[in-house]
Amino acid sequence: MTDEASSSEKPWPVRVVSQKIGQWIGRLGWIWVDGQVAQVTRRPGTNTVFLTLRDPSADLSLTVTTNRDVMDLGAPNLTDGARIVVHARPEFYAARGSLSLRADEIRQVGVGELLARLEQLKKLLAAEGLFARERKRRLPFLPRRIGLVTGRASAAERDVLTNARRRWPTIDFRVINVAVQGPSAVPQIVDALAVLDRDDTIDVIVIARGGGSIEDLLPFSDEALCRAVFACRTPVVSAIGHETDVPLLDFVADLRASTPTDAAKRIVPDLSDEVRLIGQAKQRLDRSLRGLLDREQHRLDALRSRPSIARPLTIVDSRATEVTALRARATRNLLHRLDRAGTELEHTLARLRTLSPAATLQRGYAIVQRADGAVVRAPADVAPDEQLRIRLAEGELTATAARSPGGV
């Protein structure tokens, strides 16, 4: 075998490539492998037994060859679906270009060991927060459409569909049938879960299966399935087995239903119950409304019975009487003041008349004034022949001053 690097000018022959692949694979040495038996083939007349070993969480498988004596010693009653651990060495068959495992020891995993592994996985997932209550989502009151992942024509499918439609006849389902046990169960369930989670019309996803043994329910405790459910955007309901069956899926799901029938009751409301509750609510609303109207009517009646509302003109009448009395009082006061003022005015007028020069003139006196209006008080105030003005009670006269023997 050449050690030169391959190139377009010097390519390796197929036999060289096969040999190098065999060498690389041989370096892995003896290893312990855990898997689930998908098929057991015992060929008559030979001591070689062929097993197809699948990964429980992925769609992968390897061929295992072993001696019949090894099989009879470690797992004499091995059947399809059993969980085993093999001690094997990988081998590359250059003639067929295939890889297989050559086993020299096979151990069938017992129930006790399975439970121990599940408990260890449970602690791991819990520590990572996959079971945390605060991350669980509330289911919608009435889903538009429900995604159902279950076995084909299974009792679980019938229970979910029948009970859900009995409670709400128009509920819509999208059902994806998958294997619910065996090596292909987990990959199919995970794929169906991804399809439903991408469907925007799906409001809740139900994973349902009837009862079974611990080995039958192992796919629903698979780590890959638990992580796929945890990553879903859509709320997931676990309805696996009977009430006593508690796979790890129950802890990761947003809601655990004890049975498929219980799942139908938990995700879909009962139409008759809702109609009854609506009727009761309507009755309570009617009673409350009637009570409110009665209270307000009583309140209005009480308000209307008050004198100010029942006889509103009473206040007006009483105020009108007061206003009339006040007006009369004001009129009397005003007339009294006018009378008193008139009397005072007459007295003042009398006094004025008494003191007025006109009253003196009425008694026969006269006022002599010079031309400039000055009153003559003495003869010396008047020059001879000076024109004088004599004011009488009934008019005026003019006169000329003349010198008398005694004076003017």
Image: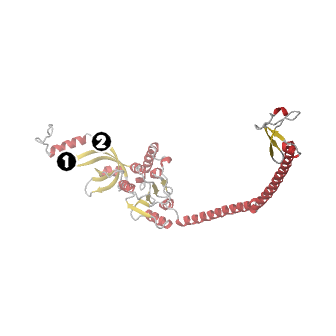
Residue 401 placed where, x, y %? 82, 37
Residue 100 relative to residue 251: left or right: left
Q: 284 above or below 407?
A: below
Please report the residue visible at 86 percent of the width from the left and 33 percent of the height from the top. 407
Name the residue carrying label 1: 94
Residue 272 on image: x %, y %: 54, 67
**Image coordinates for residue 192, horizontal then vertical, percent:** 37, 56
Give 175 or 105, whichever is nearer the viewer: 175
Does residue 327 show up?
yes
Q: Earlier in the sequence, mark 2 or mark 1?
A: 2
Q: Which residue type carries mark 1?
A: Ala
Q: Answer few, some or many: residues within 10 Å of disc 1's Cα (few below 14, many 20 plus, some between 14 and 19).
A: some
Distance between the alpha carbons at the discs numbered 2 and 1: 19 Å
Mark 2, other Cα within 10 Å: few <14 / some 14–19 / many ≥20? some
The answer to whether residue 336 is above or below residue 398 is: below
Out of 245 and 132, give the one closest to the viewer. Answer: 132
Between 119 and 299, the one lying in front of the other is 299
Amino acid type of the residue tagged 2 in the rendering: Trp
Image position, residue 14 (x, y; %) = 15, 46
Residue furthest front in the image: 405
Q: Which residue is mark 2?
A: 30
